[in-house]
Image (cartoon, rainbow, N blue to C red):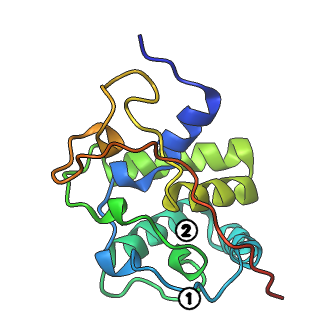
Amino acid sequence: MPHFTEGSLQRIIINPFYAITVAPQLTGEHEPPMSETAWVQANASLMGEMGCERWLRQLLDVLEGKVGAPEGPINPSQTVNIDPLFAAEHPPLIERDTWVDVNVIQIRNVGAEGWLRQLLDVLNGDIVTAEEVGFAPPGGPFGYGAPGRSNPQQRGKKKRKKRHHK
């Protein structure tokens, strides 16, 4: 029987993997130039200026590496190392518009800063697996079998160095 907690449902809703494939160049290991706090504050401000729906659409464009997508503070790889699993080729499980609509509501419910912090956690690897909610046997990321992954591991929030930028 599936078991969803409020936290697991929020991490599922916010996860862009279900709507897009992240551009592989955004998942490389690097030293992010921006602190999480600065990124969250900058993007909460951008959301207020441009509206959540437009910001979310631009976020998806940036994550997909679309030509003409805005550079700058909207790119979460400026503050975290995005888990390479987000770049695994897969068909979208939900429409972009659905992901945007649901997350507009979620931002209203939890607030922009809380939503942005949770997005960073998810992109950094704090994802809900099918086994976590009782849908699948242990082993596959995002609930799918993955070739070459013979050593199942518990997905969870990765340890990050605390960065103190002004």
Residue 4 is tagged as none
Q: Which numbered disc covers residue 55? A: 2
Mark 2–mark 1 Cα distance, whole angstroms, equals 13 Å
Question: Where residue 121 appears, x then y in whole percent?
Answer: 59, 57
Residue 42 in view of the camera: yes
Image height check: is 75 above or below 103?
below
Q: In which quarter of the image is residue 68?
A: bottom left
Query: From the viewer's perspective, is residue 101 above or below residue 49?
Result: above
Relative to 43, does residue 103 appear above or below in the rendering? Answer: above
Q: Quadrant of residue 76?
A: bottom right
- Using residue 109 as the reference point, say whether residue 165 is left or right of it: right
Residue type indicated by callout 2: Trp
Residues packed near mark 2 inside 10 Å, few (<14), some (14 to 19) or many (20 plus) = many
Is label 2 in a helix, a strand or a loop? helix
Quadrant (top left, top right, bottom left, bottom right) of the N terminus: top left
Question: Which image quadrant: the C terminus?
Answer: bottom right
For the residue pair 92 and 163, the one nearer the viewer reads as 163
Left or right? Give the position of 69 relative to 55: left
Q: Residue at x 68, y 59 (%)?
A: 117
Tag 1 residue? 72
Q: In x, y percent, where is residue 71?
A: 49, 88
